[in-house]
Amino acid sequence: MRDGRVAGLLLAAGRGSRLGTPKALVEYEGERLVDRGVRLLDEGGCHPVVVVLGAATVQVRGAVSVRNPDWPSGMGSSLRVGLAALPAEAESVVIALVDQPFITPAAVRALIAGHAPVAVATYGGRRRNPVMIARRHFAEVSAMAEGDVGARPFLKAHPELVTEVPCDGLGDPADIDTPEDLPLLDR
C-alpha cells in the first residue's frame, strides 16, 4: 500500500486559540498530537505524509513538513498549501486533522480500500474525518477551501461523488478543541 499513490495530509497549523496552545504540541500517551497524526496516516497506508504547520514550528519525523504562512486565516489555506505540496505521483490523498487523536489507522485503511474518488469516514452515520480525495478534484477542493471549513464546501457541492465509509469501531472522531476536552486524553 505504501507505493506513493495515496499520500497523507495532516492539517496541524492552528494556534489552538480556544485550547490556549497549538494542538500539534498537546501530548497524548507520551506522544505529541502531530506525531500521532503522522503515525495514523503512515500506519494507515499513506506515503508520503505531508504535515502543514503554522502557529507551532516543530520537527516532525516521518513526514514532509510545510509551513502555511497564512495559517491565521483558517483551515482552508492549510488545505491549499498541503494539496500543493503533494508529490505528482500521489493519485489521491487522505486528509486528517491533528486534533482527532482517537482515529485509528484502520479507518484510514478503510477509506483507501474502497478506491473511491471521494470518500468520507462516518461515525454513527455522521460524516467526519478523515477524508480521501482523488487528485482530479484537488484544484476544485483548493478553490473552494476558504476560512475554517476545509473540504466541506466541495463535499457539499458534489454529493454524487461522495462515498461514505462507515468507521464505527475504528476509532472515535472526538476532537480536542478546548481545555474542557483535555480530560478525554485521560480515558
Image: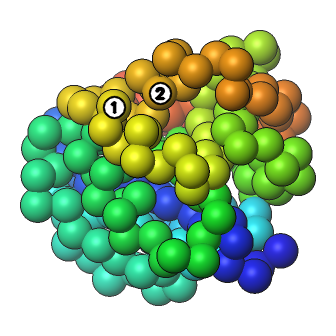
Name the spot of residue 54 as percent of width and height, x first.
Answer: 19, 60
Left or right of 146? Residue 177 is right
Give the residue drawn at x 54%, y 25%. Answer: 155
Please, which colouring scheme is shown? rainbow
Left or right of 117? Residue 169 is right
Badge 1 amino acid: Met
SS at badge 2: helix
Q: Which image quadrant: the C terminus? A: top right
Give neighbour class at mark 2: few <14, some 14-19, many 20+ (Cα, 10 Å). Answer: many
Name the spot of residue 71 as percent of width and height, x first.
Answer: 16, 50
**Mark 2 vs 1, N-terminal side:** 1
Dot label at residue 144: 1
Q: Relative to 169, say whether 96 is above or below.
A: below
The reply to whether dot 2 and dot 1 touch (C-beta < 8 Å) is: yes
Q: Relative to 130, say whether 8 is above or below.
A: below
Name the spot of residue 112 as percent of width and height, x first.
Answer: 80, 54
Give the residue drawn at x 62%, y 41%. Answer: 131
Q: Which image quadrant: the N terminus? A: bottom right
Name the spot of residue 91 as percent of width and height, x first.
Answer: 65, 64
Badge 2 amino acid: Phe
Give the residue drawn at x 87%, y 45%. Answer: 114
Dot label at residue 154: 2
SS at badge 1: helix
